[in-house]
Amino acid sequence: MNPTRHSAHGFTLLELLAAVAIVAILAGVALPQYKDYVTRSRLTDATVGLTTLRAQMERYFQDNRTYANSGTFVAPCNADASARTFGNFVVTCTGTLDGTQFTLSAAGTGASAGFTYTINQKDERATTAVPSGWGSTCSSKWILKKGDAC
């Protein structure tokens, strides 16, 4: 008579350690990439805010031939500032607002703190501040990716 053999069910300790090591390696690579991706997605709030307010300023200029207040008409830069929050960015008019020029600035708050972007009436874009590890500032374009060159 043959003794009945029972096969073992489950995993060995070595198989379990191998699976944990693979998951740890994947998490170590994926989490930093995911964090950068989420940060990049927040930066669109700045670009949307700046281009929206710039377009409003250009429409105002077409109607009034000035960027400054004209009679009873209030320039978008001088309008209610509370309407200029786009996600984690606050868009403000910086510098002197006169009849021929303006500069808009988007400063990051909360999860986007450390980022500052600008645009002016000539559509000249600049990155004036980025957090450490994101590279350097740029006077000719917006840095929207980690390590992006000017």
Image (tube, rainbow, N blue to C red):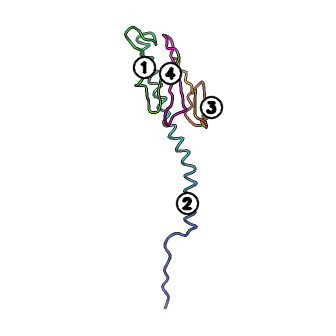
Residue on which disc 1 sits = 56
Label 3 SS: loop
Earlier in the chain: of badge 4 and badge 3, it is 4
Callout 4 amino acid: Leu
What distance separates the C-alpha of mark 1 from that of mark 3? 30 Å
Q: Nearer the viewer, residue 137 or 145?
A: 137
Q: Is residue 15 above or below residue 114?
A: below
**Which residue is found at the position 60% from the left and 36% from the top?**
132
Name the secondary structure under disc 2.
helix
Whether tag 1 and tag 2 are in contact, CB under 8 A, the answer is no
Give residue 16's position: percent from left, percent from top: 54, 65
Q: Secondary structure at mark 4?
A: strand
Q: Quadrant of the C terminus?
A: top right
Q: Badge 3: few (under 14), some or many (20 or more) residues near its Cα, within 10 Å?
A: some
Q: Which residue is mark 3?
A: 136
Per the rendering, the mark at residue 104 is: 4
Label 1 or label 2, whichever comes before in sequence order: 2
Q: Is residue 90 above or below residue 38?
A: above
Give the class, few, some or many, for how many residues have Cα within 10 Å of label 4's Cα (few <14, many ≥20): many
Q: Is residue 35 positioned above or below 73 on the image?
A: below
Residue sitting nearer the eye, 56 or 136: 136
Drawn side of residue 23 relative to residue 69, left or right: right
> In the image, residue 90 lies at what x, y percent?
47, 27
Q: Earlier in the sequence, mark 4 or mark 1?
A: 1
The first of marks 1 and 3 along the sequence is 1
Amino acid tagged 3: Ser
Span highlighted in magenta in the image:
96-121
**x then y, percent, for residue 18:** 58, 62
Q: Which mark is residue 20?
A: 2
Label 1 amino acid?
Gln
